[in-house]
Amino acid sequence: MNYEFDWSSIPGSLPFLWEGMKISLEITAIAVVVGIVWGTLLAMMRLSPVKPLSWFAAGYVNLFRAIPLVMVLLWFFLIVPQVLRGAFNLDPNTDVRLTSAMIGFALFESAYYSEIIRAGIQSVPKGQVAAASALGMSYAQAMRLVVLPQAFRNMVPLLLTQAIVLFQDTSLVYVSALADFFGAAYKVGDRDGRLVELLLFAGAVYFVLCFSLSQVVRRLQKRMATV
Amino acid sequence: MSYNWNWGIFGSPVPTGDTTYLGWMLSGLQTTILLSLSAWVIALALGSLMGVLRTVPHKGLSGIAAAYVEVFRNIPLLVQLFIWYFVLPEVLPFGLGERFKQDLSPLAQQFLSAMVCLGFFTSARVCEQVRSGINSLPRGQKNAGLALGFTLPQTYRHVLLPMAFRLVIPPLTSEFLNIFKNSAVCSTIGLLELAAQGRQLVDYTAQPYESFIAVTLLYLLINVVVMLLMRVIENRSRVPGYIGGK
Amino acid sequence: MITIDKVSKHYGSFQVLTDCTTQVKKGEVVVVCGPSGSGKSTLIKCVNGLEPFQAGAITVDGISVGDPKTNLSKLRSRVGMVFQHFELFPHMSITDNLSIAQVKVLGRSKDEARDKGLKLLDRVGLKAHADKFPGQLSGGQQQRVAIARALAMDPICMLFDEPTSALDPEMINEVLDVMVELAQEGMTMMCVTHEMGFARKVANRVIFMDQGRIVEDDAKDAFFGAPRSERARQFLAKILQH
Ligand SMILES: Nc1ncnc2c1ncn2[C@@H]1O[C@H](COP(=O)(O)OP(=O)(O)OP(=O)(O)O)[C@@H](O)[C@H]1O
Ligand SMILES: [Mg+2]
């Protein structure tokens, strides 16, 4: 091995990298919230007796799960902004590309959340809905008051695990030129000719964060199993 | 909207003139398929080996396999890819990195890095599936194999793995699908696979919609084909009389 | 044939076996009984080395099981074992279940193994099912196949771990009949079972275990006539109620 490592460009760029990390975390937070809310709605549509709703949800979920995230991001980065501009006569100076990529990311992750939540809802025994109806609750009430609370309790570890996956996925916004943590690390490495060190540093940061969180999830799972 | 749809674009020649845009698209598809299949071979082989190691009664071996899984699961695919492509050739010992950079064409460098990266990344997931397949078998099966005089490797080979693999065909199917989807990430190191060709078409023609729709449809097609293929495998490997069998 | 000498075993701080000593002579049939969790399965699994033990010694046909130099696979191939849950290999036909170990372990030819398997299948009355898969047979049939599978290896002795306790009552006898026949032919057998009818019919000795200890080790008549320990008496009374 004759490569001479030189880590000196990292300390000075930490503030810049931290800005990137904030963007990564922000995207993650938004996508998790949108993903859970929209994913829950999708899951309920999918399970609802109203056929068109359930078809729509099934189509949405299967479509997004069949396409690579990179493709979705490119769609929302390159194509959708043009459509929006055409449709709403937007001022050509407003750059909606980043917002659009962000939305695309959230819509994509919702499809995955929806599948987790659907499985969670289905794991609640059917008798629970029957019991709620017997008490005079409407379908929506039964869902909101009886089924979803139980479903979410069981799903917490899976939802968190998906959040870890999602956090890793945010690095792909690189293709839409959003300056997330990975984008920032790459930029610094490229600028200083220290790509090797910066890439290794980025990998280590992701590993420490994701591994720690996954250990937390594991502990949570164990605790829930014993309750 | 004043967009001019022109599906005929795929028939027109590319600037260099040696093929059509359709030709570009198909060569992208070919790269995607070739890349995914070769990475899948690595993933299956390595993942099965690691999955077996995770279940053997040996603390050291199962610990190594567990660490392996954690490393490949907790670093984003894109970062792993960049490390394989940009970092590894720099730090490989014995001049291997130099030979990689000098003796191989850029395309070969991209393809090899992408293949190894996808293979290792997916192998960690395959490992977890194989492990859970083995662990979900009744504990007595291993004892039954050993009691007949099989060695531990023979017990895995003839008793545990054949059933474990059958049990995990559905989750392996979704990993197989993932490898095709994940291969799109490799466009970031310049590998001209399907997604990259789609993007290239957007740059070269004024027909972004046609290009993206075509690429998206091709990914959907890959999905359908893989699912059908795996269903055939699942049906053929079905065990008569076993739960879910018949 | 089998000697068990002061064997002790623990999982962490939990003592599963304490100072177990007994032996099974050639041609003898020994029944092991005792309450759930008393260590019967563990003891019988120690005999062919499926469970390691920390103290004491076990020999089978003069070969020490605990000795790290012993080729355990080879030893196990000479000791037949039948499990509570049959443990046939679900992905293989009955014929393959019977022949795989003969071929892979004993190195017999496929044809030879197949013929031997079919002969034994006939003996347990299941020749017509040779090409089926385990999942297509009833529990009693599966257990008879499992016995045939063990016999196909020409074992010098047989270990049974509650071979009938996972079976519906109407299937128990078809399995016991095979075992009785085997005993009467002079096979050396160590059987964990609560089938006292079987014990009365063919056992030479009965071992009673409680909390990891061998509490009684008596000739059959002595055991059934007047068990020495209170625990064994209670146990017998409980079993006979059913
Ligand atoms: N892997 C293990 N780790 C810890 N304890 C164990 C393990 N296997 C068995 N034990 C314990 O050892 C004791 C003896 O188990 P064993 O299976 O030998 O009992 P048994 O007499 O066969 O009971 P049963 O009639 O229920 O089959 C039990 O208390 C059991 O909980
Ligand atoms: Mg037992």
Image (spheres, rainbow, N blue to C red):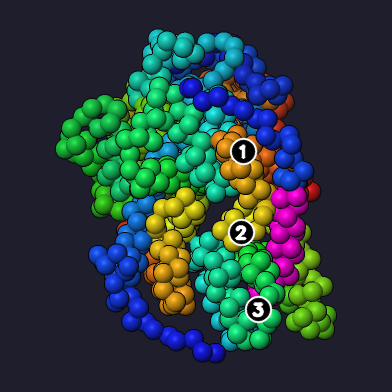
On the same chain, marks 1 and 3? The answer is yes
Residue A56's place in the image compared with B34, above or below, is below
Report the image quarter containing ligand 1: top right
Badge 1 or badge 3: first in the primary sequence: 3
Amino acid carrying label 1: it is: Asp
Residue A183, given in percent of the width and then of the height, sits at: 63, 50
Which residue lies at the image location 65% right of the left edge and 74% below the top edge? A42
Residues drawn in magenta: A19-44
Q: Which residue is mark 2?
A: A177
A164 or C48, which lies in front? A164
Residue B11, given in percent of the width and then of the height, sits at: 29, 77
Q: Which mark is residue A92?
A: 3
CA separation in Å, label 2 and label 1: 19 Å
Q: Is residue A22 magenta?
A: yes
Amino acid carrying label 2: it is: Ala
Residue B106's place in the image compared with A3, above or below, is below
Classify the position of the N terminus of chain B by image quarter.
bottom right
Choose top left, top right, bottom left or bottom right for residue A10: top right
CA separation in Å, label 1 and label 3: 35 Å
Q: Main secondary structure of the magenta part?
A: helix
Q: Residues within 10 Å of mark 1 (few under 14, many from 20)?
A: few
* Dots 2, 3 in contact, CB < 8 A: no
B154 or B72, which lies in front? B72
User: Which chain is disc 1 placed on?
Assistant: A
**For discs 2 and 1, the disc positioned in front in the rendered view:** 1
Residue C112, given in percent of the width and then of the height, sits at: 17, 34
Q: Which residue is mark 1?
A: A192
Badge 2 or badge 1: first in the primary sequence: 2
Q: Is residue A99 left or right of residue B75?
A: right
